């Protein structure tokens, strides 16, 4: 037993040490809290403020008789028809109805190099392979001379025969439509040439639709189109027919945004922060008047974060873009992630806690589960890329049910990847919740004759459910904010179409924020700040939900 004075000195030293560490922890919390407040204020500062709005064509010039926003759907469609050329209309229909990443083969047909890949340009065999220029052309755009070259090299028919002999002679012993037997290859329409090539191509995938693109009835299956264009190809449509597709499938609000973006060409030439807007209004006016570019624009106070921003689809312009496409993508990914991770995680926890024997193998399994919870998320992204995107592409792309305009970079691949990411955390939280159930509940259940499974399913799991649910929601909160694994799996895809199923291309809110912050154009940082606040609100709601549900369920279980 140490002397009294030595004990007092030891206690005093320990108190000083404890006080020092307590102060250090308190200071760390204060610094962290201040940093978070500064970060939040900076985000809010970027989300509101004055901006100079400019147009290539002012809305008053487009609609001199009444405000542009009051025009009807038909009037907006006619305005679009008058002001936009055919190529741009074609792109607008593709981007807004099919998606920017929609298969070009389905839209416009295959390139020559897709049809005969073995004839790709080779400088050492230039007489036996296509030139680079010809290989890159789509079959539907070939002229008569190019068709002869493609048929000659692709099918091995002498060029002289194709140029000079009728089809019945040049294609002797091959398949052809008797109706074209007396024509030369150069006299065929592009449709007749496609039918002839499809009948003799060495690969079964080379069909007329593959060569020329799908007809409208296939491209727009499930959407609205006029009966008279059902059998036409996308590139065959006239301007009025593109307008009909737009008018039949988009509402007035969507048409109005297209007019602003593609006709009026709305843009923000300069944006100021909230603090600058509140404290330096005269300076902003002076800067606007001093610049030739800014002087022509309108100075408006812009709330980048608004309900309209949240409900608007994604576009390529900060002036008209919104968060809806990414929000829907996040919801799809998270819902599927929960459906995958919850049964697997709870099932694994039940087995490890209630059924598994306490041996070395199970101890190693539990240790590895805890280690997996600390693995960097990018590793899960690489795993998801290797397994779900590439190895299981036939399943995750939807090819097994006939979906042909997608690849493995879909919602379901992202959901499986995120399920792997949160699965260790779900298992650990479920184990802790099950372990916290008093043993007296199990013993009472066994005492009245219940089986092991009846006890687990009807007594243990209901008692552990509040803890399991809390752990799941907190895991999902982490998954919602993850960027790295989804970047690898394919969430950086720029898509203007809302995801509508597990095999859709997608983007999620964190990746959209990353994309916007990396864009130097005026306005993108402001919409990124608005998206960050939206994401923070979603995370706050999830965490609040976890707390409320835990409290209510705990009270109901207590009686």
Image: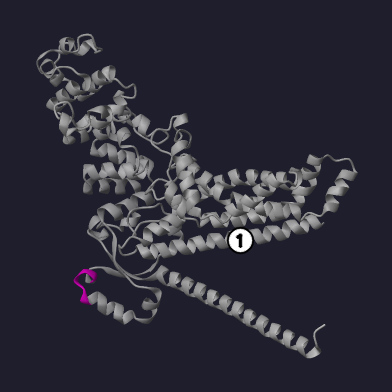
x 50%, y 57%: residue: 481
Closer-to-camera residue (236/472): 472
Q: Quadrant where the C terminus lies?
A: bottom right
Residue 287, quarter of picture = bottom left
Which residue is identified by label 1?
Answer: 543
Q: Quadrant where the N terminus lies?
A: bottom right
Measured along the vertical axis of the image, is residue 268 above or below residue 285?
A: above
Image x and y of residue 472, in percent = 63, 53
x 63%, y 59%: residue: 545
x 48%, y 45%: residue: 384
Q: Which residue occupies the extreme right position in the image?
A: 447
x 81%, y 44%: residue: 455
Q: Is residue 410 magenta?
A: no
Report crowding for label 1: few under 14, some 14 to 19, many 20 or more residues within 10 A (C-alpha): some
Image x and y of residue 375, in percent = 54, 54
> The magenta stretch spans which residues?
290-294
Measured along the vertical axis of the image, is residue 52 above or below residue 120?
A: below
Q: Which residue occupies the extreme bottom position in the image?
A: 5
Image x and y of residue 484, in percent = 45, 54
Q: Is residue 291 magenta?
A: yes
Residue 543 seen anywhere in this rendered image of the structure: yes
Residue 373, quarter of picture = bottom right
């Amino acid at each position: 037993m140490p002397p009294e004075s030595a004990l007092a000195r030891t206690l005093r030293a320990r108190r000083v040490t404890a006080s020092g560490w307590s102060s250090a922890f308190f200071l760390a919390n204060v610094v962290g809290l201040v940093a978070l407040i500064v970060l939040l204020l900076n985000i809010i500062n970027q989300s509101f403020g004055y901006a100079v709005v400019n147009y290539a064509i002012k809305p008053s010039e487009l609609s001199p008789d009444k405000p542009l926003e009051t025009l009807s759907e038909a009037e907006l469609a006619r305005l679009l028809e008058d002001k936009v050329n055919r190529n741009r209309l074609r792109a607008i229909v593709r981007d807004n109805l099919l998606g920017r990443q929609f298969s070009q083969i389905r839209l416009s047909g295959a390139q020559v190099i897709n049809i005969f890949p073995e004839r790709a340009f080779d400088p050492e065999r230039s007489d036996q392979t296509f030139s680079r220029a010809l290989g890159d052309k789509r079959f539907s755009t070939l002229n008569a001379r190019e068709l002869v070259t493609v048929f000659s090299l692709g099918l091995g028919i002498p060029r002289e025969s194709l140029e000079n002999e009728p089809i019945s002679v040049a294609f002797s012993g091959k398949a052809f439509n008797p109706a074209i037997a007396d024509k030369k290859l150069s006299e065929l329409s592009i449709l007749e040439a496609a039918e002839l090539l499809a009948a003799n191509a060495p690969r079964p995938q080379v069909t007329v639709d593959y060569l020329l693109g799908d007809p409208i009835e296939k491209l727009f299956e499930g959407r609205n189109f006029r009966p008279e264009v059902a059998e036409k190809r996308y590139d065959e449509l006239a301007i009025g027919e593109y307008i009909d597709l737009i008018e039949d499938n988009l509402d007035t609000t969507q048409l109005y945004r297209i007019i602003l973006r593609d006709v009026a060409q709305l843009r923000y030439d300069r944006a100021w922060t909230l603090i600058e807007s509140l404290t330096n209004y005269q300076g902003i006016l002076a800067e606007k008047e001093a610049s030739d570019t800014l002087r022509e624009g309108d100075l408006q106070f812009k709330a980048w974060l608004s309900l309209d921003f949240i409900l608007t689809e994604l576009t390529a312009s900060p002036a008209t873009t919104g968060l809806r496409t990414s929000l829907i993508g996040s919801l799809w990914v998270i819902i599927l992630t929960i459906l995958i991770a919850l049964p697997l995680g709870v099932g694994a926890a039940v087995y490890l806690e209630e059924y598994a024997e306490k041996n070395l193998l199970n101890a190693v399994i539990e240790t590895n589960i805890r280690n997996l919870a600390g693995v960097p998320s990018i590793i899960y992204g690489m795993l998801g890329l290797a397994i779900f995107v590439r190895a299981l592409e036939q399943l995750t792309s939807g090819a097994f049910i006939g979906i042909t305009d997608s690849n493995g970079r879909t919602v379901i691949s992202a959901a499986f990847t995120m399920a792997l990411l949160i699965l260790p955390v779900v298992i650990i939280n479920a184990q802790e919740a099950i372990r916290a159930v008093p043993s007296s509940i199990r013993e009472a259940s066994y005492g009245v004759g219940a089986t092991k499974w009846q006890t687990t399913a009807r007594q243990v799991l209901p008692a552990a459910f509040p803890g399991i649910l809390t752990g799941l929601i907190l895991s999902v909160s982490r998954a919602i904010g993850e960027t790295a694994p989804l970047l690898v799996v394919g969430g950086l895809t720029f898509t203007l179409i809302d995801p509508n199923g597990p095999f859709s291309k997608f983007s999620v809110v964190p990746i959209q924020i990353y994309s916007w912050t990396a864009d130097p154009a005026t306005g993108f940082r402001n919409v990124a700040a608005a998206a960050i606040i939206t994401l923070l609100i979603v995370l706050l709601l999830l965490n609040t939900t976890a707390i409320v549900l835990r409290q209510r369920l705990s009270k109901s279980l207590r009686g």
